[in-house]
Image (cartoon, rainbow, N blue to C red):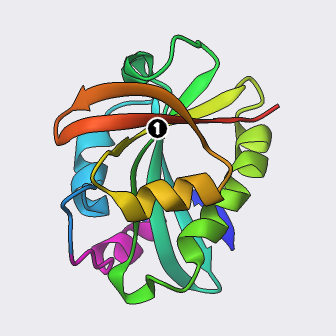
Amino acid sequence: MRLIEYTAKYKEYLDNYYLADDTFSRSPQESLLQTQRGKEFHRILAFYHDDLVTFFILDEGKDKYDYSDRADSLLLRSFSTDSRYTKKGFALQALKELPVFVQKKFPHIGTIVLGVNEENTKAIQLYKKSNFNDTGRKYHGRKGWQLIFELPIH
């Protein structure tokens, strides 16, 4: 599993990314359009061999303060796995690689935070398996109540 930051040379991979259900997450194509202007958005691609299997955004912007009061946090958002690669462990593998990736690319970051829809039980289980901790706090997001999870990096 390789995590790399998106550049235009990977556009074809995103064009071919298939998300059958976007109930809880934006498609990478939509996320790319919404984040292309901001330097605070880091679009991350997770490759297994030569296949793009997972996509997510690491957000250094002000939205992270809806989930944490820590200035040294990153907000994980728009996490998805290409529907052709679900149930193969790729999402878990990408999340397990995330702390090392963040330590290298963002050495000033101390924690990763995220909001997961309280009805998205599969994602909640995934984040728990990936060592994210449920903070017991909630945030009302655009798709309902989000449970706030965090992962200490240091």
**Considering depth in this image, is 126 or 6 the residue closer to the camera?**
126
Q: Is residue 61 above or below residue 145?
A: above
Q: Is residue 144 left or right of residue 67?
A: left
Q: Residue, x 55% and y 30% (percent of image)?
A: 74
**In the depicted view, which residue is nearer to us: 96 or 30?**
96
Q: Nearer the viewer, residue 85 or 34?
A: 85
Residue 11 is a magenta residue = yes
Instruction: Tell me the SS state at disc 1.
Output: strand
Q: Is residue 22 left or right of residue 120?
A: left
The answer to whether residue 7 shows anywhere in this view is no
Q: Which residue is mark 1?
A: 114
Magenta part of the chain: 9-20
Residue 27's quadrant in the figure?
bottom left
**Residue name at image x 68 percent, y 49 percent:** 131
Q: Is residue 79 above or below residue 153?
A: below
The answer to whether residue 135 is visible is yes
> In the rendered image, which quarter is residue 56 located in?
bottom left
Residue type, mark 1 in image: Leu
Q: Residue at x 28, y 79 (%)?
A: 18
Q: Residue furthest right?
A: 154
Quick check: 70 above or below 94? above
In which quadrant will I find the N terminus?
Answer: bottom right
The x and y percentages for residue 48 are: 62, 81
Q: Is residue 135 magenta?
A: no
The C terminus - image quarter: top right
- Give the quadrant of residue 96: bottom right
Q: Position of residue 22 (x, y in %)?
A: 20, 64
The number of numbered discs placed on residues in the rendered structure image is 1
Q: Is residue 21 left or right of residue 86?
A: left
Q: Where residue 152 sits in the image (x, y, percent)?
A: 72, 33
